[in-house]
Amino acid sequence: MASGALALICADVIRPSPAWLAASSSNALRPAMAAARDPEGFARLEAAFPADIRTTRHASGALKAVARILAAFGGRVEDIVVGDLLALLQLTSHDGARGTRIAYSALRDLGQFPPDAPATLLRLHTRTGQVTPAELVDRYDLRFRLVRDLLVDYLTERQPSLDHNSLINLSAALASNFWSDLERHHEGIDSLHLTPDVAAAWKARVSTVTRRRRLPGGQVVETTEPRSSAPSIKNLVRSFYLDIAQWALDEPARWGPWAAPCPITEADCSDKKVKQQQKTASDQRTRERLPVLPALIRVADRQLREARVRLDALHAAPLGTQFTVLGEVFSAPKSTSRAGLTGQAYDSSGRRRDFEAEEKRAFWGWATIEILRHTGIRIEELLELGHHSIIRYKLPTTGEVVPLLQIAPSKTDQERLLLVTPELADVLSAVVTRVRAANGAIPSVHSYDIHEKVWNEPIPLLYQWNVAGERRPISSNTVRDALNDVLMATGLTDVTGKPLKFQPHDFRRIFITDAILNGLPPHIAQVIAGHSNINTTMGYNAVYPAQAIEAHRSFISRRRTLRPNEEYRAVTSEEWKEFLDHFERRKLALGSCGRAYGTDCPRARLCSLPGPHRGSR
């Protein structure tokens, strides 16, 4: 039965459903389909796989996925379309999905799909690309259709001047935080002309946010807190009103019916207090983390060395044997389905350890710390670094060739060049060596622009790795996880005793603060950091209390030189005792008596009364 069914499938007499094929565990379909249906197509596809996975189970899984598609939909390899792979992807398990994604990438590289086909099927359900203003507004189910159409029209007008992420934030502020909130609390509202009571109620609601937290005992509590983004939301709504009023002068038929007095004043949008709080919190973070940076660097370097020692010991141990490394006993697996060396072992308690994954995370944690602390670049700039970002520059004066790091971030589109120090050069060299392919070149990979919500053209990114046969760019979450692994190993804590946390942006603040403290002019720090405004750079600079203390001490020293020396004689023990006895006897409360020390009290008889001296009964 099985052999007959296989023959009929290969001959395209019967076509099983994709679900039935996806559930089948038979390994006979792939070689049979390759031999009977399309030998040339399978050979061409296999040659398109990267050389380092061509003989692995991941390549075999990709060929099996193609065989299933041909069995379900007929045709040859060259007839496969994007929809065939998407249909199979929805039906396969985790391992099967990996093979489907590898097959998709190989067929796309062969030029079989249209130019606008997704760069990869990985995370396709979350990386859907850009959406229209109408789709953004319709996320919030606005009831009044005319205002819904107005918001769509307004977003369409603003779209050319905004990146897509800013457009999403603008739509959320106008459609959700503003109009949807008004519809929930004021039934039947149909005009932008808000009464003072309605406007005041909305501003009060948008200024707070209700958060739900789960306590250790399992109870869920709700707390109302000030909304830190309230000034930004009010500012966007205010701009909405002012834009419509201005546009109504140019196009009265289109915008005039919606022109209305703006219910939000400039004072309502003031974020001075919020920025001061953010500046204080940012400075405190920098002061806590700058002194412990050397400890973090040491632990990151130690973790990487230990991870490599463990992985090398595993590779040297025969399968099924025990080995000891760094004082711990591990057991190598008895067999492996991987081509090459295994990366997993079992500790003395039987728990499986993935030494290969640990070494990967340790390396990228170490590399991230070193690059960020030497350059002060943003995390998105770090992830956008490519092999072409490392350039050489010949000094016109001496002819000396120096390495430079070219930063061309998508956030600001402003290019800048950073000098590569010898320490940074060592780190970049280690990264380049790690990501090179067998032919010596760095593979080009597709990356996703989180701001514009589009796939970038493939470039040789430095932050990439091979995951089960797929070349992927390293995500920002992976970078943060690697940093957290290093921090947990340090055992560092903050002032509250909780584990100290580092964010990638903390290294940027530390870099700028350390540079200015060591004499770098702020305007040069501004250029290195890529800020368009020097006030932004100074906002990153955490002024240490030591600076204020030293300035105050210098001021006191100057004052001492201007006053007679006898005024600064040491206080005698009798004078100090008299001073203390005076306050003990009189029991004066701070701020309740303005009488100077050494003068008589005009109401001495009241000082004996209990309680603070108020100056009257």
Image (tube, rainbow, N blue to C red):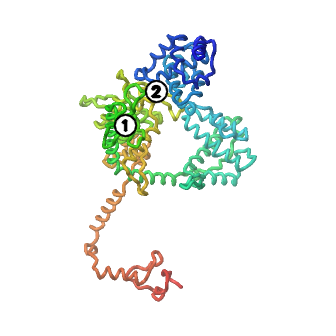
Viewer-proximal residue among 385 and 317: 317
Under circle 1, the secondary element is strand
Q: Is residue 288 visible?
A: yes
For label 1, the residue is 331
Label 2 crowding class (10 Å Cα cut-off): few <14, some 14-19, many 20+?
many
The location of residue 191, given as percent across then percent down, is 72, 44
Label 1 crowding class (10 Å Cα cut-off): few <14, some 14-19, many 20+?
many
Q: Do the residues labelled 2 and 1 touch (CB within 8 Å)?
A: no
Quarter residue 86 falls in: top right
Under circle 2, the secondary element is strand
Quarter residue 400 falls in: top left
Query: With respect to residue 50, does 360 lie above or below?
Result: below
Query: With respect to residue 287, does 441 lie above or below?
Result: above
Judged from this view, the residue extending furthest toward the right is 188
Judged from this view, the residue extending furthest toward the left is 398
Viewer-proximal residue among 321 and 586: 321
Please name the residue shown 61% across and 23% down the image.
20
Amino acid carrying label 1: it is Ser
Left or right: 423 in relation to 537: left
Q: Quadrant location of the N terminus?
A: top right
The location of residue 41, given as percent across then percent down, is 51, 12
Judged from this view, the residue extending furthest toward the bottom is 605
For label 2, the residue is 470
Q: Which of marks 2 and 1 is nearer the N terminus?
A: 1
Judged from this view, the residue extending furthest toward the front is 1
Q: How many labels does the image show?
A: 2
The location of residue 395, given as percent across then percent down, is 28, 30
The location of residue 375, given as percent across then percent down, is 36, 39
Please name the residue shown 28% across and 71% down the image.
563
Viewer-proximal residue among 593 and 384: 384
Amino acid carrying label 2: it is Glu
Please name the residue shown 34% across and 34% down the image.
321
